[in-house]
Image (spheres, rainbow, N blue to C red):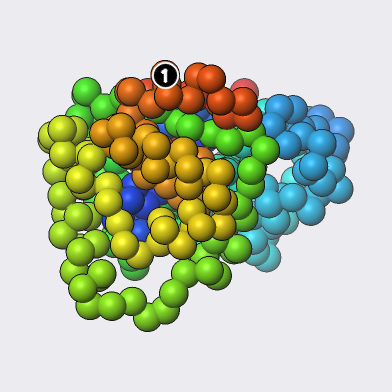
């Protein structure tokens, strides 16, 4: 059996929607699992030289966890990585979703989006990334397995501002967050998260205000001062912008490209919103 899984990059939080809101992007990793191939691991693309080839990677670990007491057949794995590692674009969620879908397929279970999401959210621990990776579009992950997918507005034109030489591991970015938060900040984020739903699904003109946040962005941007500088410049120019996931990548919209063009060390990537989540092909 040969199974290929394509999983999109995702941008989570989207400003005020901490651990809740997510967006799927048209930029996919591909994982091929072949039970007729030699049991070896091959990585191509982003981070290929950093990833283990002894079966200790996140995809293999996920497959073993999904299988539980059931035995997986021997297989070769080839991963084509387009999503950069530790940049706030859901690379770990993409690996987990690919591992879940591949394991279910090899075990003869149907890898439906709902089933894959249930496993992936439990394993990865971040349903805001797992939800758009499984269902596509714009998602709201409420917890306890509840996800609401909304159709993104057709005028959304995301632009990723990706620092080439800055990384921010999710664990480090999360451990820096204050706990507890003030009531005023909580109310501020509730209001802006509600506005963000309207902005992404119905009225992109609201994005500039809707993506403002008081819970996590300032703390995370303080960890990466060069990114903070760009964030402030983009926002001051009136272009909607937020930290993508845990960062350091920024999610912005048209207007940011010209501002960053002279800067070295940055990639500016206009991407479409992806309507669907992961795709699985057999054979």
> In which quadrant will I find the C terminus?
top right
Q: Nearer the viewer, residue 96 or 91?
A: 91
Q: How many marks?
A: 1
Q: Nearer the viewer, residue 24 or 38?
A: 24
Q: Nearer the viewer, residue 143 or 2?
A: 143
The residue that appears at 68% across and 51% down in the rendered structure is 58
**Is residue 156 visible from the viewing direction of this image?**
yes
**Is residue 280 visible from the viewing direction of this image?**
no
Determine whether 278 is above or below 196 in the image.
above
- Is residue 253 found left or right of 99 in the rendered image? left
Q: List x then y, in percent, for residue 94.
A: 55, 43
Tag 1 residue = 258
User: Which image quadrant is residue 41 in?
Assistant: top right
Indicate the secondary structure of the residue bearing disc 1.
helix
The residue that appears at 33% across and 29% down in the rendered structure is 253
Q: Nearer the viewer, residue 253 or 24?
A: 253
> In which quadrant will I find the N terminus?
top right
Q: List x then y, in percent, for residue 79.
A: 70, 33
- Is residue 146 found left or right of 130 in the rendered image? left
Q: List x then y, in percent, for residue 134.
A: 42, 43
The residue that appears at 55% across and 70% down in the rendered structure is 175
Determine whether 173 is above or below 175 in the image.
above
Q: Residues within 10 Å of mark 1 (few under 14, many from 20)?
A: few
Residue farthest to the bottom, as pictured: 180
User: Which image quadrant is residue 50 in?
Assistant: top right
- Is residue 134 found left or right of 176 in the rendered image? left
The residue that appears at 63% across and 29% down in the rendered structure is 265
């Amino acid at each position: 059996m040969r199974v290929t899984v394509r999983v999109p990059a995702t941008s989570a939080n989207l400003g005020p929607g901490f651990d809740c809101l997510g967006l799927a992007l048209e930029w996919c990793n591909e994982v091929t699992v072949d039970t007729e191939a030699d049991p070896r691991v091959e990585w191509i693309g982003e981070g290929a030289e950093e990833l283990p080839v002894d079966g200790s990677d996140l995809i293999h670990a996920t497959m073993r966890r999904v299988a539980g007491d059931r035995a997986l057949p021997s297989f070769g794995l080839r991963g084509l990585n387009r999503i950069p590692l530790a940049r706030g674009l859901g690379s770990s969620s993409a690996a987990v979703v690919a591992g879940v879908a591949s394991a279910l397929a090899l075990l003869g279970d149907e890898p439906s989006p709902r089933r894959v999401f249930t496993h992936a959210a439990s394993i990865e621990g971040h349903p805001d990334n797992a939800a758009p990776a499984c269902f596509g579009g714009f998602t709201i992950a409420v917890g306890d397995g509840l996800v609401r997918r909304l159709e993104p507005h057709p005028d959304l034109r995301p632009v990723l501002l990706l620092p080439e030489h800055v990384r921010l591991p999710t664990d480090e970015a999360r451990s820096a967050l204050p706990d507890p938060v003030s009531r005023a900040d909580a109310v501020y984020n509730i209001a802006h998260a509600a506005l963000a739903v309207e902005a992404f699904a119905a009225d992109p003109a609201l994005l500039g205000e809707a993506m403002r946040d008081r819970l996590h962005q300032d703390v995370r941007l303080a960890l990466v001062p060069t990114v903070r500088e760009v964030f402030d410049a983009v926002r001051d120019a009136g272009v909607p912008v937020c930290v993508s996931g845990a960062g350091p990548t920024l999610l912005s919209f048209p207007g940011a490209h010209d501002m960053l063009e002279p800067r070295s060390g940055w990639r500016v990537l206009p991407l479409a919103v992806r309507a669907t989540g992961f795709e699985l092909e057999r054979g």
